Image (cartoon, helix red, strand yellow):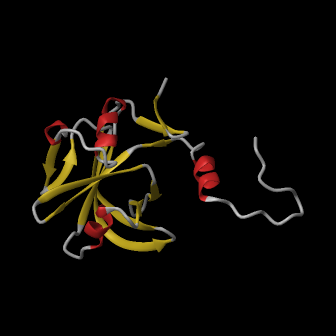
Amino acid sequence: MTDTHRAGQAAPSLTPTEFRETLGRFASGVTVVTARSAGERRGMTANAFVSVSLTPPLILVSVDHRAHMLTLLGDDAVTHFGVNVLSAAQRHLSTHFAGKPGPEEGVPWFEHEGLPLIGGTVAQLVCRKERLIEAGDHTLVLGHVEYSRYTDDDPLLYFRGQYHELG
């Protein structure tokens, strides 16, 4: 275990690299956030996703200010978005929506009441956009879950900057 400061001393300034490396020790699932803009389907890989509340059912996704998805989610005309939890077999979709696109026909899109979702995922959530909250170099998007479905497939995991699978 690496300790960045000693007891009784002020903690030194944490660099972005140190912070990223530290948080990389937290294993997370991988999601793709989806929405529709002017009839076009959009998606963005996000592993900064968390359940906020069971009653009411609320989730939160963190979106970098540089992401095109933030402009879309900030649009008042966009009232809903999807969260798709990727399966262990969907690593290619994570990289596709993280800015290294592969063939679009390789994305198993389907629609739920006009919202684009991704087929074959471990879980899908349809969320009504509740609020956007500025937080440093990201914006937190709070969503009220209106619909969900899930499978018992194994999820894709992200740990120390690499993809992993259960088992």
Judge whether 51 appears above or below 13 on screen: above
Q: Quadrant of residue 140?
A: bottom left
Identified at 43% across, 49% down, the residue is: 47
Near-viewer residue (80 or 34): 34
Number of numbered labels in the structure image:
0
166 relative to 98, above or below: above
Q: Quadrant of the N terminus?
A: top right
Along the horizontal axis of the image, is 137 left or right of 11? left
Place of residue 36 in the rendered image (x, y in percent of width and height, measured from the top left): 17, 60
Q: Nearer the viewer, residue 142 or 64?
A: 64
Asked whether, in this view, residue 14 is left or right of residue 16, the answer is: right
Q: Residue at x 39, y 30 (%)?
A: 154
* Outermost residue to the right: 8
Image-based side of 151 in relation to 29, left or right: left
Q: Is residue 81 left or right of residue 59?
A: left
Which of the 4 quarters of the picture holds residue 145? Answer: bottom left
Which residue appears at 39% of the width and 34% of the height?
Answer: 155
Residue ID at (35%, 64%): 143
- In the orientation shown, which residue stands out farthest toward the top? 167
Q: Residue furthest bottom?
A: 76
Q: What is the quadrant of residue 92 in the picture? A: top left
List x then y, in percent, for residue 132: 38, 72
Q: Position of residue 157 (x, y in %)?
A: 45, 37
Query: Where is residue 55 shown, x and y percent of the image?
Result: 42, 62
